[in-house]
Amino acid sequence: MASYLQIENISKSYGPKILFEHIGFNINEGDKIALIAPNGTGKTSLLRILAGKDKSDSGGKITFLKDIRISFLEQDYSWDPALSAFGQSMALAPEMDEGERYGYELNVRKYLSNFNIAHDAPMSSLSGGEIKRVALSAMLATEAEFYIMDEPTNHLDVDAIEFLENYLGHSRSTLLMVTHDRYFLERVCNTIIELDHGAVYVYKGDYENYLQKRQERIDNYNAETDKVRNILRRELEWMRSTPCARSGKAKYRKDAFYALKDRSEQVYTSRKLDMSEVSSGGRLGTKIFNAKDLGVRFGDKCYLRDFSYNFSRGERIGIVGPNGVGKSTFLNLLAGIEEGAQVSGSLEMGESVKIGYYRQSGMEFKPDQTVLETIGDIHLLGRFMFGHDMLNNRIERLSGGEKRRLYLLSVLKQQPNVLILDEPTNDLDIVTLNVLEEYLLEFKGTLIIVSHDRHFLDRLVDHLFVFCGDGVVKDFIGGYTQYRSYMKDYEAEQKALSRGAESKVGSGASKSGSSAKVKDTPANKMSYKEKREFEQLEKDIAEMEARKVDLEARMGSGNLPYEQLQTISSEYSVLKDGLDAAELRWLELSEKQ
């Protein structure tokens, strides 16, 4: 198996903070690697160095297999509001010749369609999740042998996550990615690399294997420390022997003593988020939110239609649905901060309700403030993994995950009895997510969560509001995995019913006076209507294939202006989809001949 990437002796620091030092590892063809580490310890910095966007402090050596294509998905995707989704993807296209560019353009169109993004949609009109899907379309369109991805599932809805999960899981490409999505990690990755205390550890296998082997490593390290301490006690007795003897001691043995002393002080400790002192607010009455015939519109677009529901004390609701259907708008409405919407119906809030609202765009810290100035409670900051060495760090120096953790603390510090969380898992590391889940399981108030993290929803909610679009909301009793299983069974049932209905086409009745005669057409034989459809399909397919050959010849001529090439490429994409559908239907009918 070919080695795609060899890393030797790379380091990164920010001021006095060492992220990693003199690390090295190897990535082979076909590896699908998840990079795991607490927020602020250098995951993004490491990916940027490997992608050529940053440099190692210690020089070092980064060697890629010659001529492999590499594509990098950054966490913060730069985009131009003046461009369309297609134009944005083409604007950031890698250097390529005309033939490669043509293939890339077709791929961009394909993946935008797969992610349900209109090619001509203005970037300025897209949600955060839709912008992420444009970035993914541009990345996948390169058909790279090696993908480097920083949080590829952030802001994506579940349909997009599952498409990406299925694509990458079956792809032959090599992957190195940072992700906090545990289901995604388990279903895509075959290797985990942990960045811990500035060193790198490689674990082959799934997430469960990683947790087990990591604990074994920690236990072995601490057991070795105990052995070193026993040796140190004997060496200390020797060092404390009579002054006369001490003056003649061998230098090498004294040096070894001090080395042992340093090693004996190295006990492995892993800082963990401690939420035991962050409690929910005061008593919550029986009235939380009472909604009756609630509707929300922005201009001609309807986000909520005739919604009626009385929220209960202690209820745990998950809210799911595609990007852009109004989930965040609904949360804003509950929190009383929606502006500019046309609201109908009524929404009443109980007098005892004390809301804590964690918003996607709610971080409003002053960048020049320090961590301590922002929260003001040293003890609480320590519980949230902000040690004394970080108290005077300015907000602008924190990583994305550290800012999110600080924001979470600022919300929970208010001790709410109703928690509204909009995508709380974005940018948080897996360790923090696990502790947050344990806290929320014990939370006594009402919990309302918008999330695309399937593991998070499965652990925390007892029913779902499913936003279906055009203002329609359905209530499903159960967790997310139960919902997806139900939907798959339902869709399979509908397909079976549809096939059953098609098999009955051609059945009919003719009446003569008061008598009737029914003639059945066997299910495996074409009806008259299907025969006519089959004959027409043969003609249509022949015409489409001829047109396809003509378009391919024109696009490959190299003589077309770019605008004309773009128009023809668009027609080609539509034609190809139509041809695929026609051929599939022809095959279905041909089995009945």
Image (spheres, rainbow, N blue to C red):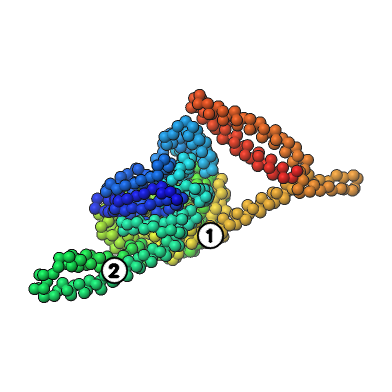
**478 or 45, which lies in front?**
45
Name the residue tied to disc 1: 479
Residue 57 higher or lower than 389, as above or below = above
Give the left or right position of residue 37, taking residue 328 as reference: left
Is residue 98 found left or right of 14 in the rendered image? Answer: right
Residue pointed to by mark 2: 225
- Residue 294 position in % (x across, y down): 54, 50
Foreground pick, 296 / 181 = 181
Report how far apart the C-alphas of labels 2 and 1 lie in the structure: 45 Å
Q: Please give left or right for residue 282 compared with residue 566 in the image.
A: left
Q: Is residue 146 visible?
A: yes
Q: Amino acid at mark 2?
A: Thr
**Tag 2: Cα neighbours inside 10 Å, few (<14), some, or many (≥20)?**
some
Q: How many numbered marks are there?
A: 2
Q: Is residue 440 visible?
A: no
Quadrant in the picture for the C terminus? top right
Q: Secondary structure at mark 2?
A: helix
Please tell me which residue is depicted at 90% across the width and 44% down the height of the picture: 512
Which element type, helix, strand or loop, lies under badge 1? loop
